[in-house]
Image: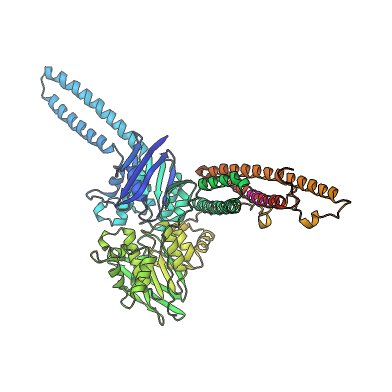
């Protein structure tokens, strides 16, 4: 059953068409991932589904009794309520039942007091009202009990614990929580409600790795419909079985998770490019034929047929490459072998010790991922090393010739709202040339118009890219990065990992994005209870170490994501050498004059007659072969048109076996068509040679 139906929906914002004539259905149990660059329309589509945005055209229909839960990126939560009651009372209808129960109970007490002082005549009416109130209260208690059974307080506490809240937080007012923890509170309330359709816009942005792992497991057990936006590749793969992708050519629908979408997209690209090449070859062959036989009256019909075919020939639209964050870090100055040494480092906030006696060492070229629960001290450690805050005790020393670059989430929020994008980046690298600054901004998708925008009008993702551009123009040779992928779209997150892979300095970074950590980390620092445990090797090495020691990796890391199966490679259809197949029954070789000139027989007339007879037979054979080849070409052209129609059907890309068989069939039919066209051209040349020969029969023969 459909929960939400889009029918011919169109919407434009700021003169840009986000969706156009979109038809989309979200059914019960669907698990949909929205894919596309920042600004392409993913969040707007969620708002359309949620009813918070109206389309310019078309219709969005929702099931009448649909219970919908929506987690936007930017939330506003009022205080005045404690955390646990906020989650528990978020169930629609429960607050109304409690209010009705309180009203009925108060009325029962008032009527009971009135009964005590009433006379006999009034008592009968009051007693009847008391009976009605008692029945109403019993019904309300029964309804409240049903709510408590379906939505128990224990379940609310379990969800809060999974999202990182302690029991001591249950009584805290929401106003006491930071923005990230308020987001967790709203997410907890949505998970507790178990709506029919759950809309999540970057739910992992403010979660640590243990909470991401818990949320992933919870959602995998969730038996309702889900629409998800996430920049975390592994999290997305674990949750979805359909993809709605915002591509340059429009909104496209695919079956499968993100990995399967990427494979289908790549296969589409290859098929379209092959089809375009085949059509170009076919076009060139037809054009050669038309050019060669345009002046031949005997070929007028065939020439006109080819001209009409050229006019009707299909035009293949190839996939456009959309803009993506792309840059390479410039070469950095070489540091000494010892980049950083930390000794007995302490940090406390009042009575709370965040770091206690931490000893660490970083060598040149290390790529260190800091993992752990929120509040464990990961960001605090980075801020101390960056010089933003002071340690309570101990020391740290950077080695010879080090220059530290630092990117943090709060840097994007600290940008000057009235400054332009260009000026904000230029202010951080006064020695950088205008060309260097423009190149850095261009790499981060800020074009000529965007660089003149004020910081205050940018989205969170755009501000994050400005802060990254500041780092790019002056990176140093030691990079400290705190959650660099937050507010980036999925593809930009992956491009950032590729760019950091080109950085020839030393990298320390905090991230909850498992794919990002896997791509970069050569060493893991697990921050927990004031201590930092060092694990040399990759993130998967760390997880393996946890399993060997019987430690749950979700305590300070994340459970390993299942490896996506590798798609089998489609066998390549054999291609005939030089575009020809080794076939029997080819055209007869043209016969030259020298071969036709047999020794003269007595009187010469008998020999000439034999030569004319032989030429007639050869010409008839050639003409018959030409007719057969023309029929074959027409048959293959019809077949190719049918195959083109099949390739245009999106369902082809959902069935791997069908797609592979069709691809092979297209390759075979194109090879056969090329051979038939080339052979036909050779036969036509032979026919012209025979007809132009002195020995060819004339019209009267």
Question: What percent of the width, then of the height, locates residue 684?
Answer: 67, 50
Quick one: which residue is furthest to the front in this view?
A: 603
Q: Nearer the viewer, residue 535 or 29?
A: 29
Left/right placement of residue 294 relative to residue 58 reads right
Quadrant of the image occupied by residue 30: top left
**Structure colour scheme:** rainbow
Question: What percent of the width, then of the height, locates residue 549?
Answer: 52, 61
Residue drawn where x is 35% and y is 76% of the image = 394
Left/right placement of residue 701 relative to residue 417 reads right
Above or below, 697 against 476 in this view is: above
The quarter of the picture where the N terminus appears is top left
Quick one: which residue is furthest to the bottom in this view?
A: 400
Residue drawn where x is 30% and y is 58% of the image = 459
Q: Is residue 385 visible?
A: no
Residue drawn where x is 43% and y is 45% of the image = 32
The quarter of the picture where the C terminus appears is top right
Left/right placement of residue 488 relative to residue 618 reads left
Quadrant of the image occupied by residue 127: top left
Question: What percent of the width, then of the height, locates residue 606?
Answer: 85, 48
Q: Is residue 547 visible?
A: yes
Q: Is residue 676 in the magenta section?
A: yes
Question: What percent of the width, then of the height, locates residue 171?
Answer: 27, 50
Above or below, 227 against 495 in this view is: above
Q: Nearer the viewer, residue 496 or 299?
A: 299
Q: Which residues are magenta?
A: 673-679
Q: Is residue 459 in the magenta section?
A: no
């Amino acid at each position: 059953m459909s929960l939400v139906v889009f029918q011919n929906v169109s919407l434009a914002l700021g003169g840009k068409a986000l969706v156009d004539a979109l038809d989309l259905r979200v059914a019960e149990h669907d698990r949909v991932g929205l894919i596309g660059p920042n600004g392409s329309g993913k969040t707007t589509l969620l708002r359309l589904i949620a009813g918070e945005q109206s389309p310019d055209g078309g219709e969005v229909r929702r099931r009448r009794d649909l219970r919908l839960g929506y987690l936007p990126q930017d939330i506003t939560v009022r205080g005045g309520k404690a955390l646990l009651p906020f989650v528990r009372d978020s169930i629609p209808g429960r607050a109304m039942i409690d209010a009705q129960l309180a009203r009925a109970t108060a009325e029962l007490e008032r009527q009971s007091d009135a009964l005590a002082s009433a006379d006999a005549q009034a008592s009968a009416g009051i007693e009847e009202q008391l009976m009605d109130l008692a029945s109403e209260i019993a019904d309300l208690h029964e309804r409240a009990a049903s709510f408590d059974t379906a939505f128990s307080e224990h379940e609310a506490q379990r969800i809060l614990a999974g999202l990182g809240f302690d029991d001591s937080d249950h009584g805290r007012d929401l106003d006491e929580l930071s923005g990230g923890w308020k987001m967790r509170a709203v997410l907890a309330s949505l998970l507790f409600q178990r709506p029919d359709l759950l809309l999540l816009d970057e739910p992992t942005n403010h979660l640590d790795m243990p909470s991401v792992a818990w949320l992933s497991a919870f959602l995998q057990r969730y038996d309702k419909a889900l629409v998800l936006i996430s920049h975390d590749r592994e999290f997305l793969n674990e949750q979805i079985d359909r993809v709605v992708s915002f591509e340059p050519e429009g909104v496209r629908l695919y079956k499968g998770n993100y990995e399967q979408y990427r494979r289908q997209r790549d296969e589409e690209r290859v098929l379209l490019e092959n089809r375009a090449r085949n059509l170009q070859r076919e076009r060139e062959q037809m054009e050669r034929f038309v050019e060669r036989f345009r002046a031949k009256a005997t070929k007028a019909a065939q020439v006109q047929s080819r001209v009409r075919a050229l006019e009707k020939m299909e035009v293949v639209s190839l996939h456009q490459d959309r803009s993506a964050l792309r840059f390479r870090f410039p070469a950095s100055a070489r540091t000494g072998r010892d980049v950083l040494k930390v000794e007995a480092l302490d940090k406390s906030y009042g009575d709370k010790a965040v770091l206690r006696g931490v000893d660490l060492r970083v060598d040149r070229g290390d790529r260190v991922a800091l993992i752990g629960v929120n509040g464990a001290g990961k960001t605090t450690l980075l801020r101390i090393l960056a010089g933003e805050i002071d340690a309570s005790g101990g020391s740290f020393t950077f080695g010879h010739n080090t220059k530290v670059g630092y990117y943090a989430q709060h840097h994007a929020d600290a940008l000057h709202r009235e400054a332009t994008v260009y000026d904000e980046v230029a202010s951080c690298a006064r020695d950088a040339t205008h060309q260097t600054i423009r190149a850095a901004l261009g790499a981060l998708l800020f074009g000529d118009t965007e660089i003149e925008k004020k910081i205050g009008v940018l989205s969170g993702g755009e501000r994050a890219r400005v802060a990254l551009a500041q780092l790019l123009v002056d990176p140093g040779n030691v990079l400290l990065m705190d959650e660099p992928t937050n507010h980036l779209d999925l593809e930009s997150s992956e491009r950032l990992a590729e760019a950091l892979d080109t950085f020839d300095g030393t990298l320390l970074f905090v991230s909850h994005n498992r794919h990002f950590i896997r791509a970069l980390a050569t060493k893991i620092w697990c921050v927990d209870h004031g201590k930092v445990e060092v694990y040399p090797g990759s993130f998967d090495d760390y997880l393996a170490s946890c399993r060997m020691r019987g430690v749950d990796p979700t305590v300070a890391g994340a459970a390993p994501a299942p490896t996506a199966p590798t798609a089998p490679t489609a066998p390549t259809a054999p291609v005939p050498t030089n575009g020809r197949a080794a076939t029997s029954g080819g055209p007869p070789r043209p016969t030259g004059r020298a071969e036709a000139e047999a020794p003269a027989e007595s009187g010469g007339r008998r020999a000439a007659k034999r030569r004319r007879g032989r030429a007639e037979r050869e010409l008839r054979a050639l003409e018959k072969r030409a007719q057969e080849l023309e029929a074959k070409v027409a048959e293959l052209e019809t077949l190719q048109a049918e195959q083109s129609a099949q390739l245009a059907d999106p369902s082809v890309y959902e069935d791997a076996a069908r797609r592979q068989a069709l691809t092979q069939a297209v390759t075979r039919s194109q090879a056969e068509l090329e051979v038939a066209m080339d052979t036909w051209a050779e036969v036509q040349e032979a026919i012209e040679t025979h007809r132009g020969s002195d020995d060819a029969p004339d019209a009267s023969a």
